[in-house]
Image: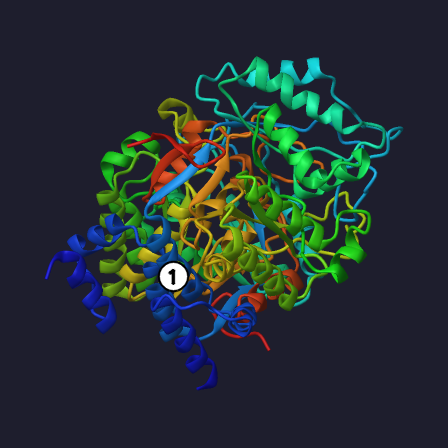
Amino acid sequence: MFVRGELEKIERKVLNGKRLSREDGEFLFNCNELTWLGSLADYVRKKICGDLVYYNVNCHVNLTNICRARCKFCAFGRGAEDKGSYAMTIDDAIKLVEEANRDPHLSGLHIVSGLHPTWSFENYLAFVEVLHEKFPRLHIKGFTGVEIQHFANISGLSVEKILIRLKEAGLEAIAGGGAEILTDRVRNLLCPKKCSADQWLNVARTAHKLGIKTNASMLYGHIETFAERVEHLIRLRELQDETGGFQTFICFPFLPKNTALEKEIKQTSMWDDLRTMAISRLMLDNFQNIKAYWVMLTVPVAQVALSFGANDIDGTIHRENILHDAGATSPRSLAEDEIIRIIREAGRTPAAVDCNFNIRRIIT
Amino acid sequence: MNVLELAKEKISSGERLNFDEILALYEDNDLLYLAESARRVKESKTGKKIFYTVNRHINLTNVCKANCPLCAYQCRSGSNRAFTLELDDVEKILRDASRIKNLSEIHIVSSLHPEKNFSYYLDAVKLVKKFLPHVGINAFTPVEIVNFAQISGKNFSEVLSELIKAGVTSLAGGGAEILSERVREIICPKKCSAAEWLEVMRTAHKLGLRTNASMMYGHIETIEERIEHLLKLRDLQDETKGFQAMMLFPFHPENTELGKKFNLRRVGSWEDLKMLALSRLVLDNFAHFKAFWIMLTLPIAQLALSFGADDLDGTIGEEKIIHAAGAKSSSGITREALEKIISEAGFQPVERDSFYREVL
């Protein structure tokens, strides 16, 4: 049988450590062999990263939801005058982190925000400087490629210069968001005011050259085709071949609630979520880590995703805002002992890491 | 060959698993191996078909004299949550239900009301039969049957015969919890014993009633007790062949005395899918496994189709018992939505009646 033969061909490639092609990726998205896919991805996961599952005790800091990009898939961004809009002062940010820092295990901050129409680059930079100075123990991961490109646009500085200044201020890693789907067709329809696919990749490339690690992501389940998902994965894989600077890959299923696409697009199924996770693990053979982001997937799906290629379950978060505006039904934070329980039930060993995947504690 | 290898060998040749082998598979914790094996068993029995039915649940009352620590549904009479349907109320529900296209089954399970006598329940069944003469009546768990025997002074066989005469076509599978006296003493001390539960099923099967079976896991039971539970069901099925479908209920600790007392948390989706696949492998003489979406939520129920389930249960209408314990699923779903979930997973949706006959 044609299909069976094709599956076997792909299986042999994976077992022999050969790279999957674009055609293989597209074939996998169109086949419905979910547990077979999971087993293959699980095999690769074991080979690349063993049995540890990474998590971090972190705090999300979203400086503002006022945004001039107003992408169609976003329920977080607002106009300055809109109801529920906010912009933190430095004192607000300090207060939030102080509260989260009562947990002695807190290891890092994750800072991502809207593209505020009147804030300068220095405004953003000041948050990093002050938070780093006040909380020198905490690692700071912040800003997506979209924000970095925005800082370059509004300051007239190069992307490289922006990254150098952020690094000097205390930034240790770049967040993985804003990649969405790295094709201009999709971006022109969904997020025309955001940086282009090439610009997003350029920020990552520049950061990697400066020794700053970044994450990568894919937002799927909106208007993209399966072929575009594969194209996206291949573009990430090519850059990773070149630089080796990506740390983890995160699959974001699109949550349509409260977005401009709410009426046209239904939320992805768990079936699609797990399939996409497994295919990402198989295609991204040069990525060390694949993250099951529980906020979007929900905790039950994220747990099962640990057998579909994931080895990273993100963090405790403290208080999630962006996706809860889009109707995420998961809790806004997870207690560390709950994360540990989820990982252990899956028969794996929890390991707390910082934003550069240095292991802080292995929970035996 | 160690026990695990032997178990895998047996699975690939379709041989029956014993206690030690089941335990070894549980401890091995290879989720996707269990899934693939369970799905092969499912496909050998029902191919690519996934069944669902158009049904309605009727919960007659939540006033209960058993007060099991595991239950968030029951309450005492006089509580502000208490309700008891009278026959007029049931009639109203049935008039609504009679307008549902292709309605195949009415499912009736309730608490053990301290004052209602056996004829109340019989009359409710007769009313269903009168309004919906062609619809299957899947009603009462063995726990309720034992209660009917106690309050009427009749034996199981007499109680069941009267219910059959009134219109009951199959028995519900609930109330099995974990079939171990040690566990029942803690989680449901006033409920029927494990031996009584099995005896009611045996008697029902002998009288020609088909029944379902179930297990409620994830509270204070040991893994060994879960396995013994499955083996008790498998033994009885060898003897009578009267069980139609197996259901697995993860324990929802919210709002329960048991949850509070032992500080229990709901087990994860990993455990749910693992128990489903493992049970499918153990109960080789059961034709059907339900992924009860009300308990599992729809996304996990969809995934369960890859872990050995072949039945998504039904459209349900209004469900009260599990939602009292904090279930997050909605309480009803359309036929179209169920069919879409099944097709998306690469299976073929088949609408069934109460006896797994295809509805054309």
Where, quadrant-wise, is the N terminus of chain B in this rendering? bottom left
Where, quadrant-wise, is the C terminus of chain B in this rendering? bottom right
**A75 displayed left or right of B31:** right
- Secondary structure beneath dot 1 equals helix
**A320 displayed left or right of A283:** right
The amino acid type of the residue labelled 1 equals Ser
Q: Position of residue A6 (x, y in %)?
A: 45, 79
- Of residues B84 and B154, the one drawn nearer to the viewer in this rendering: B84
Q: Is residue B287 visible?
A: no
Residue drawn at the location 35% of the way across and 59% of the way down? A43
Q: Position of residue B8 (x, y in %)?
A: 22, 64
Q: Residues within 10 Å of mark 1 (few under 14, many from 20)?
A: many
Chain assignment, label 1: A
Q: Position of residue A179 (x, y in %)?
A: 66, 50
- Of residues B26 and B52, the one drawn nearer to the viewer in this rendering: B26
Residue picked out by circle 1: A39
Q: Quadrant of residue B127?
A: bottom right
Residue drawn at the location 21% of the way across and 50% of the way down? B23
- Of residues B86 and A207, the one drawn nearer to the viewer in this rendering: A207
Say if B147 sits above or below B305 in the image. Answer: above
Q: Position of residue A249 (x, y in %)?
A: 53, 49
